[in-house]
Image (cartoon, coloured by chain):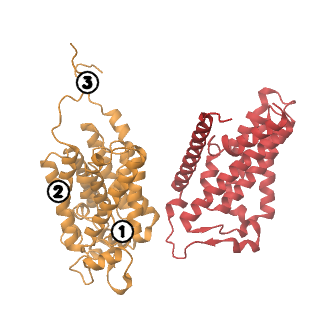
Amino acid sequence: MTTAFVSSPYVSPGRSLKRLMIDVIIGLIPGTLAYAWFFGPGILINIVFAVILAIAVEAAVLRLRQKPIKPHITDFSAVVAAWLFALCLPVHSPWWLIAVGIGFTMIAGKHLYGGLGFNPFNPAMVGYVVLLISFPREMTTWYLPIGIDGDVLGLFDSIAYLFGLVDIQQWDALTSATPLDRYKTGLGQNLTAIEIRQSPLFGIIGGIGWEWVAGGWLLGGLWLFFTRTIRWQIPVAVLASFGAISVVIYLNAPEATASPLFHLFSGGIMLCAFFIATDPVTAATTDHGRIYYGVLIGLLVYLIRGWGGYPDGVAFAVLLANMCVPLIDYYTQPRVYGDDA
Amino acid sequence: MNSIAMSNKITRDGLWRNNVALVQLLGLCPLLAVTSTAINGIGLGLATLITLVLSNTLVSLIRGFVRNEVRLPVFVLIIASIVTIIELLMRAYLYDLYLVLGIFIPLIVTNCAIIGRAEGFASKNSVGASALDGFMMGTGFLFVLALLGAMREIIGFGTLFSHADLMFGEAAKSFTIVFNDNYPGFLLAILPPGAFFGLAMLIVGKNLFDERLKKKAAVIDGLPDIV
């Protein structure tokens, strides 16, 4: 008699990759809706365009690699990567910008390393960083939210702009600095924090619009947490270390820094803490390691915001922490039960 | 091996099969650093080519007189002297190009490809074969530098042969080809990561081509003899 040999793992997690990705997509919805409410439907168009492109690129690469196409497309991992990538871009971007970014996300970030599960770097952040250092002008053109004197492009104008059919010059008062940008340039001109906050860009705690978007990520993040899609270690470590360093710096020099609450509800830190840093492939895999990994990201984001060349540093922080993951995992292996060492 | 077969082998090795940049992966530092435009690549490639020919010739000439224990310092001295001569000549006659290439001209001394050929080939072969080897290896290197520079320039700036006047004088200003006036530029191709991507693509291309050739050869070998 022979018994079939079954290899580990013996206990099934009971949830497929597809289900996991769908939960992440559900978690992204509140923040995305807030984004579209305040900054116009351009962001939704970016997301749809990026997702379609990502699926097309994924299918083409899978075909080239002679892998089955359908199971890889329908696990929705490409959708999540493209969605996160699109959220990092300015609300209105030309189509070629998104195409180049998706190309790097899917090909260089994911498939050159061997596909999902083998990539050391977060693919969406790879695509975003390539664009950020290659096209500084396009990537730093940010648009005004509603509620401030100025225009917000509607659905058809957004589509027309995406494909270069309209000249953006016909609207005035469309673009502006982001609140984080304003802080960076303001502090560079020796303005005090109070003077900077006089700008109409600022809302209750963060920038107008941005604070609600960040709140949306927080809400979606809690959903991920309660559906056990993500573990608590990484988001808590990112937000706690980021909050801690911003409190320390703020108490030291309240005139010359933004408040910790402003920092938490501005830029990409909320999205990063719940959706980007928690990517199961590129994050640390041990419980202790996840905390070190999160702390590293939180500190790096603050350092880049405070003293780096860019107003926000989420993408660079995540990529730098991704690089450290093998080391973190190596030194945080849990002790095997019964083993003395 | 007779001399014609030998020189054929040297030529094939230098240009393709054992290409310094694509197969041996030597001299990557200048290769990656200066190939942001085609003209920069050609400039450094020519300087390296001349160095390789001269150093291979000289090393081969003295190979009977140098004791094995001190051969490497002697090789380095020879190479450094040649590079210094070239640097001074460039400073005299191609000053603008010299300014662009900067530190990478004196750094040719440390190019592993040159000491590698001196140690691996010239110190064991006749003067003629060594000079030919230096010329072919240098040409292979120049070819990759120029190609990589052209690729990065086209993708990064949307132009080709810009600043040709640095090397060929005022008349060469018209060499520049502009593909698209409204090209936004792709900074990544000009920055160091672009060099790594570009070189990787070239290596992929070479390996693919070789594999095709091998398959074709296998098919031809496998055909039944009709005659």
Q: Which residue was labeled with disc 3? A: A336
Residue A257 occupies quadrant: bottom left
The image quadrant where one finds the C terminus of chain B is: top right
Q: State how far apart marks 1 and 2 are (Cα).
A: 34 Å
**Above or below: residue A103 compared with residue A4:** below
Image position, residue A237 (x, y; %): 24, 47
The image quadrant where one finds the N terminus of chain B is: top right
> Residue at 30% across / 60% down in the picture?
A51
Report the amino acid beneath label 2: Ile
Label 2 lies in what chain?
A: A
**Above or below: residue A154 compared with residue A12:** below
Left-right relation of B15 to A304: right
Between circles 3 and 1, the one closer to the viewer is 3
Label 3 lies in what chain?
A: A
Report the amino acid beneath label 3: Val
Instruction: Answer yes or no: are tags 3 and 2 on the same subunit.
Output: yes
Q: State how far apart marks 3 and 2 are (Cα).
A: 37 Å
Tell me, what hue is chain A?
Answer: orange
Q: State how far apart marks 3 and 1 are (Cα).
A: 48 Å
Mark closest to the chain's N terminus, 3 or 2: 2
Mark closest to the chain's N terminus, 1 or 2: 2
Q: Which mark is residue A26?
A: 2
In depth, the one of B178 and A179 nearer the eye is B178
In depth, the one of B210 and A328 nearer the eye is B210
Callout 1–callout 2 Cβ contact below 8 Å: no
Residue A302 visible somewhere in the drawing: no
> Residue at 79% across / 27% down in the picture?
B68
Q: Which mark is residue A184?
A: 1
Left-right relation of A139 to A149: right
Image position, residue B79 (x, y; %): 77, 44
Tell me, what hue is chain B?
Answer: red
